[in-house]
Image (tube, helix red, strand yellow):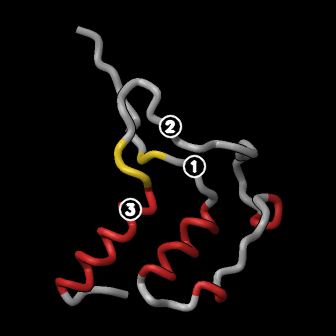
Amino acid sequence: MAVRLWHLANDGAVTWAEFAERAARQAGLNASLIEPCSLKSLHLAATRPRYSALAASMAPCFRPWTIRIARYVHARQRLGTAA
């Protein structure tokens, strides 16, 4: 039997900087401290594609990533383990 690997993702596309800013705001942190930067400025050893959003094309997407961040932060705050 062939084994298949599925990458599942939340609905929507976002940059790492946008993700970090949204997570910071949701957690009540100062999102203005996050500084977006280009891939080139990171001087990474491996070449990275300019656009590499993870998508779930083989299965329905989960809820939007913005909702998932809110639920995660809320759960951490409820447990007393927020940032």
Pointer 1 local density, CA inside 10 Å: few below 14, some 14–19, many at least 20: some
On-image quarter of the C terminus: bottom left
Residue 39 as seen in the image, left or right of residue 76: right
Q: Name the residue under label 1.
A: 13
> Upstream in the sequence, badge 2 or badge 1?
1
Mark 2 neighbour class, 10 Å CA radius: few under 14, some 14 to 19, many 20 or more: some
The residue positioned 46% from the left and 45% from the top of the image is: 11
Q: Which residue is drawn at 60% across and 62% down?
A: 16
- Disc 2, disc 1: CB below 8 Å? yes
Q: In this view, does 40 lie to the left or right of 4?
A: right
Tag 2's secondary structure?
loop
Residue with the most extreme top position: 1
Q: Which residue is drawn at 41% across and 84% down?
A: 27
Rendered image quadrant of residue 5: top left
Q: Compute the Cα span from label 3 to label 2.
A: 17 Å
Furthest-right residue in view?
40
Q: Quadrant of the N terminus?
A: top left
Residue at numbered disc 2 = 55
Residue matched to label 3: 67
The residue type indicated by label 1 comes to: Ala
Q: Residues within 10 Å of mark 3 (few under 14, many from 20)?
A: few
Disc 2 marks a residue whose amino acid type is Ala
| Kind of element beneath mark 1 | loop
Residue at position x 35%, y 44% in the image: 62
Residue 76 at x, y percent in the picture: 26, 79
Label 1 – label 3 distance at C-alpha:
13 Å
Disc nearest the viewer among 3 and 2: 3
Circle nearer the N terminus (3, 2): 2
- Three-letter amino acid code of the residue under disc 3: Ile
